[in-house]
Amino acid sequence: MDEFVEVSSSIDNLIRLNLITKNNDVIELGYDYSKFELNTFYTAFSNSLDQNSKIRIIKYRMELTNFGMNFFNICSKN
């Protein structure tokens, strides 16, 4: 679970810094989302809910912004 929280915080910070953006208009149709549904955190939380509650995965794509691409290019120069 700690890894999940760390990744989530990292993504939030990259969005806040405008290095990446979350695009709700584009969904990867062929992407296999089962690895998220089989994640121990997801299954544990899902199993702890009562019968009238449920969680769902909101699908979206993360994209580099122009600023993020420039940042990457500068930092990855040899």
Image: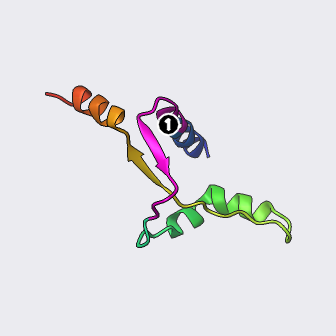
Q: In terms of secondary structure, where does tag 1 sit?
A: helix
- Depth check, front residue: 33 or 16: 16
Give left or right: position of 66 versus 29. left
Which quadrant of the structure image shows residue 66? top left
- Depth check, front residue: 45 or 66: 66
Residue 15 colored magenta? yes
Work out whether residue 72 can be spotted: yes
Q: Quadrant of the C terminus?
A: top left
Please provide percent x and percent y for residue 21. 46, 43
> Mark 1 belongs to which amino acid?
Ile
Residue 23 colored magenta? yes
Q: Find the magenta span and give its range.
A: 12-27
- Depth check, front residue: 27 or 57: 27
Q: Residues within 10 Å of mark 1 (few under 14, many from 20)?
A: some
Residue highlighted by disc 1: 15
Give left or right: position of 28 versus 70. right
Please provide percent x and percent y for residue 67. 35, 32
Q: Residue at x 50, y 67 (%)?
A: 33
Give left or right: position of 41 versus 45. left
